[in-house]
C-alpha cells in the first residue's frame, strides 16, 4: 500500500532515534513541524492497570527510542498512574496523574525532549479527537494535563517521557491508560488510506510504501493553493511532529524529523525513515507551524 495512504494523519513533537525493536515508528523527518491548528487537536478523530496492557473500550531526541507499543501502563519499573477513570464530556478538563519510578515514588526529574519534559496525547478509540499537549508538573511530581472538550466514548491517554537519572535514566518511555467519557457514543469510521490530506488550507501529500517492521523512506510535501510551502517554523525544535496510532488497538508510534532546522523557512519536502511495528491501517497526525499557528493534518496509511 502506498505510504501516502498511511501517512497523512501526521501531527505532534518528538523523540529519539528508534531501534528496530522500537515500539512504533522510527522516523527520520526531513522537516520541522508539529500540531493541529492553533488548538493542537484534530476532531476526526480509560481506567488503569499497572503492569498490564489496558485495552480500550469498544468504540471504536533522539537518543534511545521507546520500546513497546505504548499500550502498557507500566514498564521496567516505571508506571503511569491516576485515580481518574472517567472525564466529563463537552468541556475543558484537567487530568491529574503521576509517573512513579522503580522505588514506587513519583518521579520529578525528567530530561527535556523537543523542548518539553513530557508529551501527552489523547485519542478516542475510533482514532478521532486527537490532542497533543504538554502538562505542568507540581513539586510533588503530580502532573496536570489540560484537555479540550472530549466527546463521549473511550479514550486512551499517552505519556511520553525520559527520566533524567536512575535505572531508566536516558530511556524513552511511552505509557498509557484509558478513561471513559460518559454519554451517547457514536463511532466515526476510519477514513480509507489516502495519499494526501488537507488542513487549514494546506495540502499534505505522502509518497512511499510502508511494510510492517521494515524501515522505509517516506516523503511528505506541503503545499497551499498549489504552491510549495517554504515558511514552516520550528515547532518543538523541529519543522514537523508526527504521531501514529494503529486501528483497533491504538498502538502508538512516534516519528522523528531529521532535517536541520534553519529559521522560519522549512519546507516544502520532509523526509522520513519510517518503521511501523505492525501491519494494518494507521492514523497519522502531522503537526506543523506557520506564522505562529499550529496546524494538524490527519491521514490514514496502510502498512502491509
Image (spheres, grey):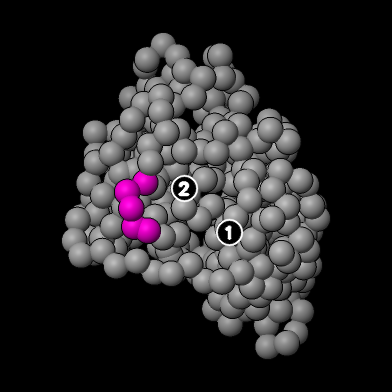
Taking 170 as reference, is 245 above or below it?
below
Residue at horizontal 53 percent and vertical 52 percent from the top: 246
Residue 30 visible in the picture? no
Q: Is residue 91 left or right of residue 77?
A: left
| Closer-to-camera residue (180/236) | 180
- Describe the element under mark 1 as helix, strand or loop: strand
Residue at horizontal 41 percent and vertical 51 percent from the top: 122
Q: Which mark is residue 86?
A: none
Q: Residue at x 62, y 24 (%)?
A: 170
Real-space Cα distance between discs 2 and 1? 11 Å
Occupied quadrant, residue 135: top left
Residue found 41% across the figure and 60% down from its top: 126
In the picture provided, is 291 more to the left or to the right than 221? left
Q: Main secondary structure of the magenta part?
A: loop
Residue 85, image x, y percentages: 24, 41
Q: Which residue is mark 1?
A: 281
Q: Is residue 90 magenta?
A: no
Residue at which label 2 appears? 249
Look at the image and give the residue range highlighted in magenta. 56-60
Position in image of residue 171 (x %, y %): 61, 26
Percent position of residue 296, x then y: 54, 66
Vertical order, 177 against 262 (above or below): above
Residue 274 at least partly seen = yes
Left or right: residue 22 compared with residue 260: left
Amino acid at each position: 500500500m502506498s505510504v501516502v495512504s498511511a501517512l497523512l494523519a501526521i501531527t505532534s513533537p518528538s523523540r529519539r532515534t528508534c531501534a528496530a525493536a522500537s515500539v512504533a515508528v522510527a522516523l527520520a523527518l526531513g522537516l520541522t513541524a508539529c500540531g493541529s491548528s492553533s488548538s493542537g487537536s484534530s476532531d476526526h478523530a480509560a481506567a488503569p492497570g499497572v503492569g498490564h496492557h489496558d485495552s480500550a473500550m469498544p468504540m471504536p531526541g533522539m537518543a534511545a527510542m521507546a520500546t513497546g507499543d505504548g499500550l502498557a501502563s507500566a514498564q521496567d519499573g516505571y508506571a503511569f498512574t491516576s485515580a481518574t477513570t472517567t472525564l466529563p464530556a463537552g468541556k475543558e478538563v484537567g487530568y491529574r496523574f503521576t509517573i512513579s519510578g522503580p522505588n514506587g515514588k513519583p518521579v520529578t526529574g525528567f530530561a527535556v525532549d523537543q523542548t518539553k519534559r513530557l508529551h501527552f496525547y489523547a485519542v478516542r478509540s475510533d482514532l478521532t479527537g486527537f490532542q497533543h499537549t504538554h502538562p505542568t508538573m507540581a513539586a510533588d511530581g503530580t502532573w496536570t494535563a489540560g484537555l479540550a472538550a472530549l466527546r463521549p466514548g473511550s479514550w486512551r491517554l499517552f505519556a511520553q517521557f525520559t527520566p533524567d537519572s536512575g535505572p531508566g535514566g536516558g530511556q524513552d518511555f511511552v505509557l498509557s491508560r484509558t478513561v471513559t467519557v460518559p454519554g451517547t457514543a457514536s463511532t466515526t469510521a476510519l477514513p480509507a488510506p489516502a495519499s494526501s490530506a488537507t488542513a487549514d488550507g494546506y495540502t499534505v501529500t505522502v509518497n512511499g510504501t510502508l511494510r510492517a517492521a521494515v524501515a522505509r523512506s517516506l516523503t511528505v510535501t506541503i503545499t497551499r493553493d498549489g504552491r510549495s510551502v517554504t515558511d514552516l517554523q520550528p515547532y518543538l525544535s523541529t519543522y514537523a511532529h508526527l504521531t501514529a496510532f494503529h486501528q483497533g488497538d491504538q498502538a502508538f508510534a512516534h516519528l522523528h524529523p531529521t532535517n536541520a532546522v534553519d529559521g522560519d523557512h522549512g519546507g516544502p519536502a520532509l523526509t522520513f525513515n519510517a518503521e511501523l511495528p505492525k501491519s494494518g491501517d494507521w492514523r497519522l497526525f502531522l503537526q506543523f507551524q506557520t506564522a505562529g499557528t499550529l496546524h494538524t493534518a490527519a491521514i490514514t496509511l496502510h502498512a502491509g
